């Protein structure tokens, strides 16, 4: 299971990368939803939960987040947690 500190670190990295693109959480959620193949689109509150370290995205959502940011998953999440079920 992912520690609180790991989730917070992930959230901080995500928030910085989104801010570097000058996107709001709403804008990022819309962009990530375009790349997500799941049943439900991303919502601003989902992104907020990730950025604040409260939740960690499931693998399919993490993949969409990384594609949106144009990065590899290991850049955003430690390799130990990539592909882990949360």
Image (cartoon, helix red, strand yellow):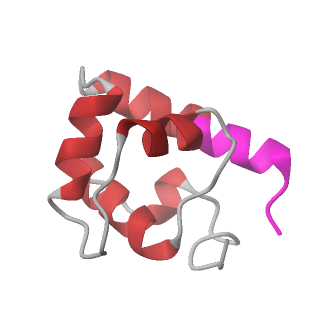
Which residue is at the far front? Answer: 40
Q: Position of residue 68 (x, y in %)?
A: 24, 52
Instruction: Point out the image quarter for the C terminus.
Output: bottom right
Whether residue 52 appears in magenta in the rendering, the answer is: no
Q: Position of residue 78 (x, y in %)?
A: 64, 60
Give left or right: position of 9 versus 45. right
Q: Position of residue 49 (x, y in %)?
A: 57, 40
Residue pictured at 44% horizontal, 41% vertical? 47
Principal secondary structure, stretch drawn in magenta? helix
Residue pictured at 82% horizontal, 43% vertical? 5
On screen, 6 above or below 27?
below
Give left or right: position of 44 versus 30. right
Q: Nearer the viewer, residue 46 or 17?
A: 46
Residue pictured at 37% horizontal, 36% vertical? 44
Q: Which residues are magenta?
A: 1-11
On screen, 32 above or below 38?
above
Q: Nearer the viewer, residue 42 or 80?
A: 42
Q: Position of residue 82 (x, y in %)?
A: 58, 72
């Amino acid at each position: 299971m992912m520690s609180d500190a790991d989730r917070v670190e992930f959230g901080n990295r995500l928030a910085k990368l989104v801010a570097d693109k000058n996107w709001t959480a709403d804008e990022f959620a819309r962009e990530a939803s375009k790349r997500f193949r799941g049943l439900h689109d991303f919502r601003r509150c989902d992104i907020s939960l990730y950025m604040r370290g409260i939740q960690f995205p499931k693998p399919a959502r993490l993949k969409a987040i990384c594609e949106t940011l144009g990065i590899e998953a290991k850049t955003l999440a430690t390799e130990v947690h990539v592909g882990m079920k949360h």
